[in-house]
Image (cartoon, helix red, strand yellow):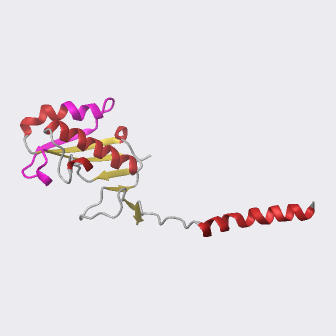
Amino acid sequence: MKRAVTVVLMTLLTLPSACSRAKPAPTPTPESVSENGVTWHLPYGRPTRPFSPAVQVGNILFLAGQIGTSANAQGGVVPGGIQAETRQTMENIRDVLEKSGSSLDRVVKCTVFMADMREWDSMNEIYSTFFPRNKPARSALGANGLALGARVEIECMAAVP
């Protein structure tokens, strides 16, 4: 009996190392880099452009401006005008927030850049649906020449629990 218990224990002790030899662990993709109290969140891996999607200082998360791009837009903004772009922009913001440890209900400030301020009301119809309870503070301005010919770009700041 004593020998059987020893064999079982030895098998259990060597099982994890045997399994790890059989199947190597995948190499993790860095999702954040911290230095001197600042965390650069990299939810999509290392940036290919000279900015980070989100940077955290203390419990405040600063998001880079987002436009209405999607995988289906093939490198451009989604078709359909200001409302479609605003919806996709806000979905992109939600994705970065969630992957960086926050959420839309923790957004405290947004800045909206619009190619045409006459589209203000149409943009607001969609934007407001993403903040049904507490509305963040917001600034808005007209801009000439947003990236990829976008109609709207939105940047946010959010609290991180």
Q: Residue furthest bottom?
A: 21
Q: Quadrant of residue 15?
A: bottom right
The percent position of residue 151, horizontal first and vertical second, equals 12, 44
- Residue 106 percent across, percent down from the top left: 37, 41
Question: Is residue 128 visible from the viewing direction of this image?
Answer: yes
State whether residue 90 is above or below residue 38. Answer: above
At 34% from the left edge and 40% from the top edge, which residue is drawn? 104
Q: Which residues are magenta?
A: 125-151
Horizontal relation, residue 124 to residue 22: left or right: left
- Residue 133 within the magenta-colored segment of the rendering: yes
- The quarter holding residue 80 reads top left
* Residue at x 22%, y 33% (from the top left corner): 126
Q: Could you say where residue 7 lies in the image, as x and y percent from the top left?
A: 83, 65
Above or below residue 139? Residue 48 is: below
Residue 46 percent coordinates (x, y): 33, 64
Nearer-the-camera pick, 145 or 44: 44
Q: Is residue 107 above or below residue 53?
A: above
Identify which residue, 116 or 23, lies in the foreground: 23
Q: Is residue 142 magenta?
A: yes
